[in-house]
Image (cartoon, rainbow, N blue to C red):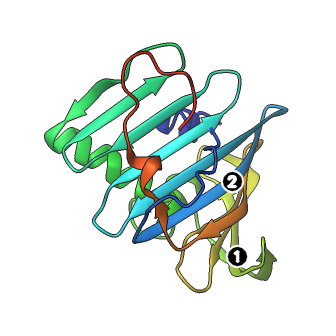
Amino acid sequence: MAFLGALIMLAAPSVAAAAETIAGTTLTYKETSNGQRTTQVIARTDDGRVAVLQSSDQIVYVQYDGAKYWICKKAKRCRVAAQGSKAKKTGEYISDSFFKPNSPSGLAAVVMTKPRPAGAKTIAGVISDCKVSPVLLQPKKTATLCTARKGGFLTLLKAGGETYRLKHFVDQVESSFLTLPTGVWNGTI
């Protein structure tokens, strides 16, 4: 479904040994869309910085650093895609989609109509409350959205042939994940 594909161009970071950490949260998802699988890592710091990395055929890293929205593509230089209020809005939209999906600007509002409770599930060891609804733009299809009972972040989204399933989360962000690549980017963070 294009609502998330257009929103985010996201890859899995390499794990740095003994790297400095920053207060925040890092979520790792397995996404399935149109038969393709990718791993997406979304991090948000307590001070509002957001970064996303996607591992797929086209590796992409995006970051909102509080002032600018950056896009990095493998074998290319990072570039500023937006600044000021436009960058802030994009950063908040990414943050709300994954960290506050039930907010007025989160995924529930974008994907669901008339959501109703659908019980609890444990996803990646996280107790989650779920709801179901017709898909907003495809009312004959059903969407399922689950959020962590503690923290409220997205643990599962199934809608219109697209699935995001939480694989792992940590209550911190590796500082290296927020360092913009310099020169021509080799696709690793």
| Circle 1 SS class | strand
Number of disc labels:
2
Outermost residue on the right side: it is 35
Name the residue carrying label 1: 130
Of residue 20 and residue 52, the one placed in the foreground of this image is: 20
The amino acid type found where label 2 is placed reads: Tyr
Q: Position of residue 176 (x, y in %)?
A: 45, 48
**Residue 172 vertical position relative to residue 53 in the rendered view, above or below:** below
The mark that comes first in sequence, 2 or 1, is 2
Q: Are marks 2 and 1 in contact (CB under 8 Å)?
A: no
Name the residue carrying label 2: 29
Q: Alpha carbon of mark 2 to alpha carbon of mark 1: how far?
A: 17 Å
The residue located at (39%, 59%) in the rendering is: 105
Q: Position of residue 24 (x, y in %)?
A: 43, 69
Of residue 8 and residue 2, the one placed in the foreground of this image is: 8
Residue 100 visible to the viewer = no
The residue located at (44%, 26%) in the rendering is: 72
**Residue 70 vertical position relative to residue 148 in the rendered view, above or below:** above
**Residue 139 vertical position relative to residue 53 in the rendered view, above or below:** below
Q: Left or right? Give the position of 188 relative to 173.
A: right
**Residue 180 vertical position relative to residue 130 in the rendered view, above or below:** above
Q: Quadrant of residue 40?
A: top right
The residue located at (65%, 56%) in the rendering is: 28
| Circle 2 SS class | strand
Q: Left or right? Give the position of 38 relative to 6.
A: right
Q: Choose mark 2 or mark 1, whichever is in front.
A: 2
The amino acid type found where label 1 is placed reads: Cys
Q: In the rendering, which numbered label is found on residue 32? A: none
Residue 132 visible to the viewer = yes
Density class for disc 1 (Cα within 10 Å; few <14, some 14-19, many ≥20) is many
